Amino acid sequence: MSTLPALPALPSIVNDARAQRYGLTVAQLRDLETQHAGRCALCRETARLYVDHSHATGDVRGLLCCRCNSGLGLFRDNADTLTAAAKYVTRPEQPYESIRSHTNDLSGEG
Ligand SMILES: [Zn+2]
């Protein structure tokens, strides 16, 4: 019988097939799930979690909610692009002429 701690009332991600898919044992995957306490490693929302792994190495990086896991994939796991996106969404709002001038600089047009 298992003596593992109880988890939040969310569906567990743990099953034999999932553990095997990522090269973990069920106990390791259960431990990871317990460490995350049912929260996404990025947004910290309580949600159903998915195993996030590096597509380059196959290594498991953590557990993410569907939106964060999909987001990383949409950004092709590119840290530079993700950093640029973070700066983009946190920059002060700019008047149209300022944005237009900036995009002209990028395209080489004047
Ligand atoms: Zn998330």
Image (spheres, helix red, strand yellow):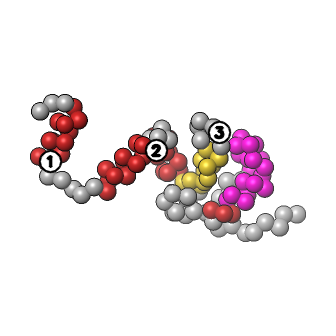
Residue pointed to by mark 2: 79
Which three-letter amino acid code belongs to the residue tagged 3? Gly
Task: Classify the position of the C terminus by image quarter.
Answer: top left
Viewer-proximal residue among 27 and 16: 27
Q: Give the Cα separation between the discs numbered 1 and 3.
A: 42 Å
Cβ atoms under marks 1 and 3 closer than 8 Å: no
Where residue 57 sits: x, y (%)? 63, 37
Specify the label residue 50 is tagged with.
none
Residue pointed to by mark 1: 98
Task: Classify the position of the N terminus by image quarter.
Answer: bottom right
Q: Nearer the viewer, mark 2 or mark 3?
A: 2
- Is 24 magenta? The answer is yes
Q: Give the Cα separation between the discs numbered 1 and 2.
A: 27 Å
**In percent of the image, x 57 and y 62: which residue is there?**
39
Viewer-proximal residue among 50 and 87: 87
* Magenta extent: 15-33
Badge 3 crowding class, 10 Å Cα cut-off, few under 14, some 14 to 19, many 20 or more, is few
| Mark 1 residue CB less than 8 A from any atom of ligand 1 | no
Badge 2 crowding class, 10 Å Cα cut-off, few under 14, some 14 to 19, many 20 or more, is few
| Mark 3 residue CB less than 8 A from any atom of ligand 1 | no
Viewer-proximal residue among 106 and 34: 106
**In percent of the image, x 48 and y 38: which residue is there?**
76
Q: Which of marks 1 and 3 is nearer the N terminus?
A: 3
Disc count in the image? 3
Where residue 103 sits: x, y (%)? 20, 39
**In percent of the image, x 37 and y 52: which residue is there?**
86
Q: Give the Cα separation between the discs numbered 2 and 3.
A: 17 Å
Q: Earlier in the sequence, mark 2 or mark 3?
A: 3
Residue pointed to by mark 3: 58
